[in-house]
Amino acid sequence: MTTMVQPPASAAVARLDHVDVVRAAASTTDEVLAALGSSRHGLTGEEAARRLQSLGPNAVRSHRARGIAVLARQLSSPLLLLLAVTATASYFVGEKTDAAIIGLILTASIGLGFFNEYRAEKAAEALHSQISHDCVVRRDGHPARCNVVQLVPGDLVELRLGQVVPADARLVEASDLECDEAVLTGESMASPKSTEPVPTGSSLADLTSCALMGTVVQSGSATAVVVATGAQAEFGRIALDLGERQPPTDFQVGLQRFSMLLVKVALALTSVIFVVNVALRRPLIDALLFSLAIAVGISPQLLPAVVSTSLAAGSRRLARMKVLVKRLVCIEDLGDIAVLFTDKTGTLTDGRVQFIRAEAEDDTHAYTTVVYGIACADVSVDSGRAVGGNALDVALWDSPATLVARQRAASIHRLDVSPFDHTRRTISVLVRDETGARLVVTKGAPEAVLAQCDSVPDALQQKLDREFAAGNRVVAVATAPAGQASRLADVDSERLHLQGLLVFLDPIKPDAGAALRRLADLGVTVKIVTGDNAAVATRVCSELGLTEAAAMTGADVDACDDTRLSERIAATTVFARVSPEQKARIVRVTRQRTGGVAFLGDGVNDALALHAADVGISVDSGTDVAKDAADVILLEKDLGVVANGVVEGRRIFANTIKYVLMGTSSNFGNMFSAAAASAFLSFLPMLPAQILLNNLLYDTSQLAIPTDRVDDEQVARPSHWDVDMIKRFMLFFGPISSLFDFATFGVMLWVFHATHSTFRTGWFVESLATQTLIIFAIRTRRVPFFRSTPSRPLAAAAISVVVIASLLPYSPLAGTLGFQRLPVTFFLALAAMVAAYLVLIEWAKSWFFRAPTAPTPERAASTSTRRLHRRAARFSARQDVQPVRKGRKSLDPRDRTG
């Protein structure tokens, strides 16, 4: 660890580590810079690269695919483990062939699941590598954008409103800086910061001269020198001690409930079967193996693999569509969206803000308005170009029309700044102009600035109204004399004088209207939540065809209780001039009325609403705190991209449900048939190895389900888990499957007078054929093949499995597996039974789905509550943290907040 002793200027440091943040807070800025071998100009690019090579990336955790963890999940099934133990026992009591067959089938099943889940993990790893955070760092004396992973001790970083502090850093310069440190200290109030050293030995909450990794810049700005990165930062140390996992998503909760349903059914059936077989005086080991095989057979062993394959394939498709999900299971949440709140800039409008003109009483005041507007600009500049800062300020700075004004603004010196915040909606700067006079310049939302002015000329008010009506964005600039004050706090409260208006154009996106119509067709209601003026937002909505664009302001929201607000939200399209807290309240109230609420935002003022929503959506160019609060990151801020995500989420969910419905109905039917058959037959209706092989072949065919096409009506409305419907489906269609099993029993016993082996062979082929081919009926609510065509991989997989099952009795493995050749006439009977089965299923399907189940308010509320708790837990407990290894670090700060 580097000590706080200033080395000689000529000393060469062979390997820099880090400076303890507590010591750094108690030392002066110059001492810290000297100890780190840095300066107020930052490091050179060459030195930063050398330190990065030596110390490794600024990393808190990674999302790496780990084969051991995936394999452990495959082996965690108690039924599989019990079956393996029983098969081992059977080996030692002489049933070596059966034990070997069961072992091979179990190994194949586990291997298949491992392969598919590991591929999904690799997809997630690739996904997270695309999500990044940038910051502005001084290198070679110039500001430049840099990925936070590349920060090293000694780097000078600029901290701005809404940024997540990328490393532990000692403040060099600070202007009204306040940081939200709840993630580290639990303190809900923002902590004021300054450059003054603190007493030695201060607690983490008292380090007011430092900004700590993982905290959020609540207000103000600063320049700070990085003192510790990655696992050496305080956040990194705490994160590595957390072994917590994120609470499950609603999708995972549904899977868990479904799994518990199968466990209950499996326990009931296997217990009955075991008791019956023991009562019939069959060998105990045979009865136990048969019962366990039944239990394995009823549980869709490859469900995790099917889900993982669906989600991984979906994530790759979404990535091509410029949608990144932080966790694969969040894809399903996208499909459940019913209401989408979004800001206006960049979604309905182009997002490339352009300065077009200044409006004032005359040309002189218009020019002065631009000069003072630039003097207030919050931007980082390199070689005359803005490399970071507020979008409006960047547009003002980079406009060719402001070149002369920039040259004059360069002679105006800032003395003090009260940075912009989303409550006051203004920024105030104390400046000294070229004549030596001191002025307070205030710039911000016109309503906020005009409220502080002594008077507003009618001509300017009319111009302001015209600009709002035209849909343009407007910033007001006002000034007041400051006497000899050296700080804003020393300025006598004096009314401002309005200088003029800065007008910006943010044109409507050409494809925004089509995207809105597409979302409407998907059953998603879009509402606009903006900090802009209501007239501007309403005008934009009207031009896009949202003719019922009724508007509420932040004041209107505060005037309503939750009941009244819920009623007004339903009839409102635009929410304008709303604060971060009001945005979050609007989202929460909507969630109480209906489930599936999404919020799309990219600013620090959107973070609360992103947390409150069922699905938080941000963009790759958004602020760090917005990206950290979101579940989904868009590489392009476009409602059409959101619509793609919604469709893909619903498609993946629809395909997953196909497997679930297939598995529950056909497996339940087959196992029910086995239970009944074992009660009246004098022999086991199917050997344990045959049951497991049947299950393996069936599940293997279903791995093609993620490739299947989905009917338009299946993605037209929000989708969600309904375990009660799955249970009804199982109890309704399972007996139909059993009916044809019993028909097979009759054919084998009374028509073909089958031996034990022939009986088992015939039922093996029939059960696999019916439960596999039924996917063509279950996969759609339309008439299969004529009105809904399956994907080629799914059709090929299903037919191939049936062919394999039919050929096994004629293969060299037949004797080993206990199969006998079947007469040709059996296959004619089988074809007739399969055809009758499919016809009956079609009739039953139309009857069953004639009254679709709708989500209940209770379901919506419970779903939203779970998601809110999940997001709160994720925000406060950085999960999935992996151990740090010496040398190459394996942790990734880009994902440090989930």
Image: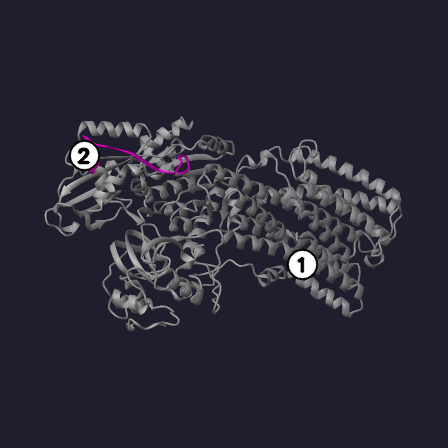
Residue at (24%, 68%) from the top-left corner?
A: 199
Q: Secondary structure at mark 1?
A: helix
Residue at (41%, 53%) from the top-left corner?
A: 133
* Quadrant position of residue 20: bottom left
Q: In the rendered image of this protein, does residue 662 appear above or below residue 99?
A: above
Number of other residues with Cα within 10 Å of mark 2, as a class: few under 14, some 14 to 19, many 20 or more:
some
| Residue position marked by numbered label 2 in the rendering | 365
Q: Three-letter amino acid code at disc 1?
A: Gly
Q: Position of residue 838 (x, y in %)?
A: 74, 37
Question: What are the residue bounds of the magenta stretch?
Answer: 346-368
Of all residues shown, which one is farthest toward the left?
Answer: 483
Front-lying residue, 411 or 323 = 411
Whichever of labels 1 and 2 marks the residue nearer the N terminus, that label is 1
Can residue 550 be seen here? The reply is no
Q: Position of residue 684 (x, y in %)?
A: 80, 55
Q: Position of residue 561 (x, y in %)?
A: 33, 38
- Name the quadrant of the C terminus: bottom left
Q: Three-letter amino acid code at disc 2?
A: His
